[in-house]
Amino acid sequence: MSVFYPYVSIDCVIFGFDGEKLKILLIERTINNAEIGLSDKKLPGSIIFEDENLDNAAIRILNDLTGLKNIYLSQFRSFGDPERANKPRDKQWLERTTQLKIGRLVTVAYVALIKINRKIIFQSENTTARWYDLTSLSEMQLAFDHNQIATEALKFIRNKIQYESHTLFELLPNKFTMTQLRNLYDTILETKSDVRNFQKKMLQVEGLEKLDEVQKNVPYRAPRLYRYNKKKK
């Protein structure tokens, strides 16, 4: 039987793209009893077991809370402020959930980019996973220090796509237009790319293939479709 290790947790920042806006996957937790009454949002995360390594813990926790499988998670930073788990409401919730006394809690953060049509499975009566606009995050007060973790994850992704452009393709459909790719790039970096320069830059990315197909059912001149072939990367 696995035993919780109450000093280290995992938190996962999952980004998606709906074609117009960048999204973040959040867990809404609901507990109603005499001691705690709350309904708020947090990143998918939990405490690790004593007998599992960090990568395995991240895979397990994400699957337990969302049903997502086969997600490539990148560990990007740890957060260990002594006060991060001392918010009374969050601490009570965590202690009640794990049946453990929680003191100082260090969390190891992972990030992933996934296609937004991936199926989310709710496995708990007290939590629900949903996509939210990333721009609305500033108006939310997430549990623990999860606002900070999400912000740092976005900085990590912005830096990553500067030298690993193929990272972008994780957020797009299997076949996409150059406009969709540019919109995604500009949304993440908050820029406005020149159309010709951007296309020239992207066509140099190893694995990007131009298809003999065009986008269907559009009220304008159908643009060319592309796909990313990981095998040619």
Image: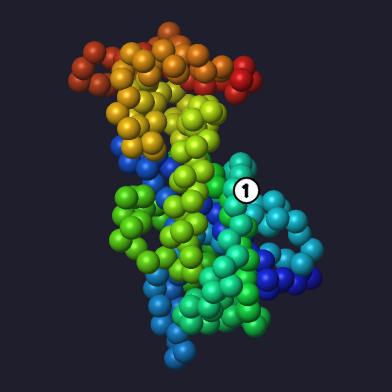
Q: Is residue 127 visible?
A: no
Residue under the image location 46 percent in, 46 percent down: 154
Instruction: Give how far across and how far down residue 61 sits, in percent.
Output: 62, 59
Instruction: Give how far across and how far down residue 92 sits, in percent.
Output: 53, 82
Q: Residue furthest top?
A: 212
* Front position in the image: 80 or 51: 80
Q: Residue furthest bottom?
A: 34
In the rendered image, the quadrant that contains the N terminus is bottom right
Crowding near the residue tagged with mark 1, few <14, some 14–19, many ≥20 C-alpha atoms within 10 Å? some
Q: Quadrant of residue 175?
A: top left
In the rendered image, the quadrant that contains the C terminus is top right
Instruction: Give how far across and how far down residue 63 sits, in percent.
Output: 60, 54
Residue 210, compared with residue 93, is above or below; it is: above
Instruction: Write down the residue under mark 1.
Output: 75
Q: Is residue 197 visible?
A: yes
Circle 1: element type? strand
Residue 226, compared with residue 94, is above or below; it is: above
Residue 185, compared with residue 207, is above or below; it is: below
Instruction: Give how far across and how far down residue 25 sits, in percent.
Output: 45, 53
